[in-house]
Amino acid sequence: MPWKYASKTLREGRGWTDDNGFKHPYNWASAWTDANKKSWGVTWEDLPASEAAFDNRFYWGRKTDGTLIERSLTDVNVVDDDGKAVNDPITGKQMVMLGLKSLAIAQAKTEAAGLLAPYDWYVTRKSEKSTAIPSTISTYRDAVRTSCAAIETSINGASDLAAFMALYDTPVDSNGDATGNAPINDWPDAI
């Protein structure tokens, strides 16, 4: 999404020289109003669809016509150009490219493990010394496991890419203020 002057692409934060030899300051993009930019012949030009930005969490890239190439929600067996299975040289088994759902579930489990880890010593202490785990700790750990299960259920319930992407949307009120966490990141408050 570049700024243009005649056929030149202008970079924000860099000075530039117009066709009359006039040197413009580095802060032209932030200091000038839209009217100033227009008076100097500076215009905004949207990139063509084939070059527009995309969210690489959900898309591989774009086709030459600008159509987005979706990442697969499900795991896909890796094959070569001839359609033959590509085997892992170590295990000898066919390689599998993990889909978005598998990757998101693995991330949720990693997050849950990270939230539980600081309190694991309470469990060890109970096992070794029969010292009770404080109820706030037990309640929190149960809430983390419940949240992880709910996140997994939401991930597995996404029927298409749009439903999967919606899991990353933070709910907002009519003013645009967040009213909670995105479903993919709905963990209990830390204790």
Image (cartoon, helix red, strand yellow):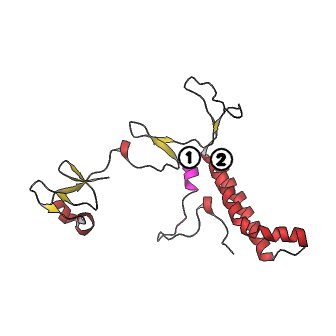
Quick check: 88 left or right of 177? right
Q: Residue 162 location in percent, x, y?
A: 54, 49
> With respect to residue 101, does 96 lie above or below?
above
Q: Residues within 10 Å of mark 2 (few under 14, many from 20)?
A: some
From the image, tell me which residue sits under label 2.
102
Quarter of the image for residue 154 reads: bottom right
Q: Residue 146 location in percent, x, y?
A: 74, 62
- The label number, if any, that marks residue 161 in the structure image: 1
Rendered residue at 48%/69% (across/down): 174
Q: Nearer the viewer, residue 28 or 179?
A: 28
Rendered residue at 38%/37% (across/down): 65
Q: Nearer the viewer, residue 23 or 90?
A: 90
User: In this view of the protein, can residue 39 be seen by the observer?
Assistant: no
Queried whether the magenta region covers residue 179, the answer comes back as no
Q: From the image, which quarter does the C terminus lie in?
A: bottom right
Between the residue at mark 2 and the residue at mark 1, the CA separation in whole angstroms equals: 14 Å
For the residue labelled by badge 2, is the local secondary structure a helix, a strand or a loop? helix
The kind of residue tagged 2 is: Ser
